[in-house]
């Protein structure tokens, strides 16, 4: 066996479109390579260019996944990050909105600051021994449900292949041209167009997925999706934009979302059934036109039993966002109930993970224990 590095990321270096296409053309030559890799990569550039052109025309675009770009996207709205991350083919490092002080419109900011103080009071009342710094972070985490998914506040590094960034730009063009101009899309489409306008010069003519009729994967165009539980599963539930943004980071699972015709909103558990619940609903409802992150959307989640357990190993934890922790726990319970009499193997497999938080999982060793422990990780209110 021989292993060689033929390309690698170099900080500060901007790979030109010509170089990326040339690299892809050479990579395409590996499939039918009569000689060595060294001879292939030193062949005449004209021969490489012809092969690259043939692969574009034939639709053999996978070779264009070899060259990648490390993009940094600054001051982008959360919804753009959600759309990009839903495609699955990427690596991302994203500034967390959970613990970041947001700077939205004046109307949002007024309520955001108001609720940070309310949540500080509520959390300190529930957990009087908690450190002030932790209380402040959790107050921000809950108050950010008021902030619009269109607030340009997110910074992320996004590593993506030449093929994928070309596909994404074409999907954005298709969405702008063909999707209806409802209130949500009137806000979204300008950002999609801006993304296309400012993307570095990496667009290659013909490198698109039009033959396969692929589109942005985030939005569900199906009227109904059945719930099923077995070797694979499909389940439906409500989640906020904020939870969705975390859930679909599990790229072995597939996610779709759909907006409600009439807005619905999440009530954080720490104020649910308290004197603050009605006030919260009133305040967040007043921001409906901004599409706050606490607005609920209809979600469909699909995958295999094993990949769902991988999600459990991350989300059934006191360090995870409470909303997604409780939702994951509910899906696990539903999965177990629906396989008890239909699939013994899956039922018994899932039972191994039904005793509580991930620190109870067989063979699991936690490197960063949370403050809650197994007893409170799934019963906490923040």
Image (cartoon, rainbow, N blue to C red):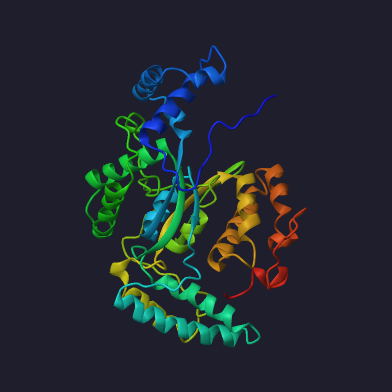
| Residue at point 31%, 60% (across, down) | 261
Identify the image quadrant of the C terminus: bottom right
Left or right of 63? Residue 362 is: right
- In the image, residue 22 lies at what x, y percent? 41, 27
Tell me: residue 31, above or below residue 129. above
For residue 345, which quarter of the picture?
top right
Q: Nearer the viewer, residue 90 or 27?
A: 27
| Residue at point 59%, 64% (across, down) | 320
Q: Is residue 282 visible?
A: no
Q: Is residue 130 visible?
A: yes
- In the image, residue 160 lies at what x, y percent? 45, 43
- In the image, residue 134 lies at what x, y percent? 59, 78
Q: Residue furthest right?
A: 363
Identify the image quadrant of the N terminus: top right
Q: Nearer the viewer, residue 225 or 7?
A: 7
Q: Nearer the viewer, residue 271 or 313?
A: 313
Left or right of 136? Residue 82 is: left
Q: Nearer the viewer, residue 356 or 121?
A: 121
Tell me: residue 296, above or below residue 140. above
């Amino acid at each position: 066996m021989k292993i060689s590095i033929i390309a690698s990321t170099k900080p500060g270096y901007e790979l030109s479109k010509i170089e990326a296409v040339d690299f892809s053309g050479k990579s395409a030559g590996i499939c039918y390579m009569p000689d060595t890799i060294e001879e292939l990569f030193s062949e005449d550039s004209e021969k490489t260019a012809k092969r690259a052109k043939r692969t574009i025309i034939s639709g053999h675009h996978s070779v264009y996944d070899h060259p990648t770009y490390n993009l940094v996207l600054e001051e982008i709205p959360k919804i753009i990050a959600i759309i990009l991350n839903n495609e699955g083919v990427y690596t991302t490092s994203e500034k967390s909105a959970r613990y970041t002080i947001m700077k939205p419109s004046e109307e949002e900011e007024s309520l955001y600051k108001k609720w940070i103080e309310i949540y500080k009071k509520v959390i300190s009342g529930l957990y009087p021994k908690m450190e002030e710094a932790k209380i402040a972070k959790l107050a921000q985490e809950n108050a950010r449900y008021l902030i619009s998914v269109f607030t340009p506040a997110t910074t992320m590094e996004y590593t993506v292949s030449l093929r994928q960034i070309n596909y994404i730009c074409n999907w954005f063009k298709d969405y702008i041209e063909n999707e209806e101009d409802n209130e949500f899309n009137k806000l979204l489409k300008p950002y999609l167009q801006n993304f296309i306008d400012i993307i570095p010069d990496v667009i290659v003519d013909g490198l698109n997925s039009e033959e396969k009729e692929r589109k942005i994967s985030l939005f569900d165009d199906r009227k109904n999706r059945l719930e099923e539980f077995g070797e694979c599963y499909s389940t439906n539930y409500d989640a906020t934009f904020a939870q969705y943004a975390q859930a679909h980071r599990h790229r072995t699972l597939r996610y779709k979302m759909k907006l409600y015709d009439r807005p619905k909103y999440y009530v954080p558990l720490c104020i649910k059934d308290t004197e603050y619940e009605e006030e919260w609903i009133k305040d967040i409802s007043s921001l409906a036109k901004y599409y706050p992150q606490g607005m609920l959307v209809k979600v469909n989640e699909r995958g295999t039993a094993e990949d769902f357990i991988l999600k459990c190993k991350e989300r059934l934890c006191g360090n995870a966002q409470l909303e997604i922790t409780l939702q994951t726990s509910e899906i696990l319970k539903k999965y177990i109930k629906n396989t008890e009499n239909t699939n013994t193997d899956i039922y018994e497999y899932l039972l191994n993970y039904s005793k509580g938080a991930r620190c109870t999982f067989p063979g699991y060793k936690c490197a960063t224990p949370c403050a809650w422990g197994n007893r409170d990780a799934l019963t906490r209110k923040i």
